Structure formats: C-alpha cells, structure tokens
Image (tube, rainbow, N blue to C red):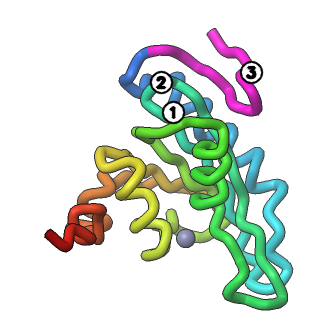
Amino acid sequence: MKQRVSGATLVGTSSATSDADWRELRAMAFAALDHAYAPYSRFRVGAAVRSRDGRIYSGCNVENASYPASMCAERVAIATAVADGARDFIALVIATNAAEPAPPCGLCRQVLAELGPRLEVVSCTSRSGESRWPIASLLPSPFTAHSLDRS
Ligand code: ZN
C-alpha cells in the first residue's frame, strides 16, 4: 500500500526494504533528478531515502553561484526527512545521468552515517549499471557523537 504522509510517501510499515520499496526509491530519485538545479556543474542528482518506519523522502542537488552554498541531493532528502520527524534511515537511492554510478561525496557520507548507521546505499544511472554499498564501507571510521565525548 502506498499513501502520502505529510510530504512523504509511505510504502510500507516493515522495517525491511523490499524489492518494491527499492523500485519506489529508484522512481522517486529519478523524479527528483528532473528538478535538480545544477547550472554550474551540470551534474544533476536526485536522491530518495527511506526511514525504518517506511517513509520515503526525495531531494535533488541545489547549486548556487556561491559554490560552497550548494547542497547535495542526498543531504536535501535527509534534511527534508528530518524536518518531518523521520530518523533511522535504512535505504538510499542516488540517481544520476553519469556514465557510471556515483557514490555519495564525503560530506554526505558523514551525514548519512550519523542518521543511518546501517544504511544501504544504491547508486544508479539513466544509462546503465548500479552500485550498492553499506554506509560502513563508504565511511568506515565516521566522526560520531562519541567522538565529542570529553569526559
Ligand atoms: Zn554530497
């Protein structure tokens, strides 16, 4: 069953990510890709993330003439989800038109690792191919809340 919940798509209540969930994530990531604002790099990216409770949120990259102000699609999706109260992300799809599946950048890996320590990341392109990584393999030693412990 699929229903809209306050801006999110609820695709199920199971904590596991089914094949249907992955298909929905891919569809939403490519839909978001169409909205990417990337006039500088022309590297358009869409992303869709699923929380353990089954909500899916999407995002696209949003660039700026002040380059450091640009935001990656992955972090836009995560920020949208967090603003809606979602946490504990378990699945992420990144969509591009690149020749090969693109992994998330280092900054996004840090954010993804904090809010989805068991996240599975899939990257796909409109051309061909798909790559999958557990977040722990993309960022094996993340800086965490524990790293801030000063006691
Ligand atoms: Zn990034």
Element type at mark 1: helix
Give the position of the C terminus as an image quadrant: bottom left
Foreground tag (2 vs 1): 2
Query: Label 2 is placed on what type of residue?
Result: Asp
The correct choice, above or below, for 5 with respect to 75 in the image is above
Q: Residues within 10 Å of mark 2 (few under 14, many from 20)?
A: some
Element type at mark 2: loop
Coordinates of residue 148 in the picture (x, y in percent): 27, 71
Q: Which residue is mark 2?
A: 53
Query: Label 3 is placed on what type of residue?
Result: Arg
Disc 1 vs disc 3: Cβ atoms closer than 8 Å?
no
Instruction: Estimate the spatial distance between the alpha carbons at disc 2 and disc 3, rounded to whole Å.
Output: 14 Å
Q: What residue is rendered at 38% in x and 22% in y?
A: 15
Q: Which residues are magenta?
A: 1-13
Q: Which residue is mark 1?
A: 22
Q: Residues within 10 Å of mark 1 (few under 14, many from 20)?
A: some
Determine whether the beta carbon of the residue marked 2 sits less than 8 angstroms from the nearest atom of ligand 1: no
Determine whether the beta carbon of the residue marked 1 sits less than 8 angstroms from the nearest atom of ligand 1: no
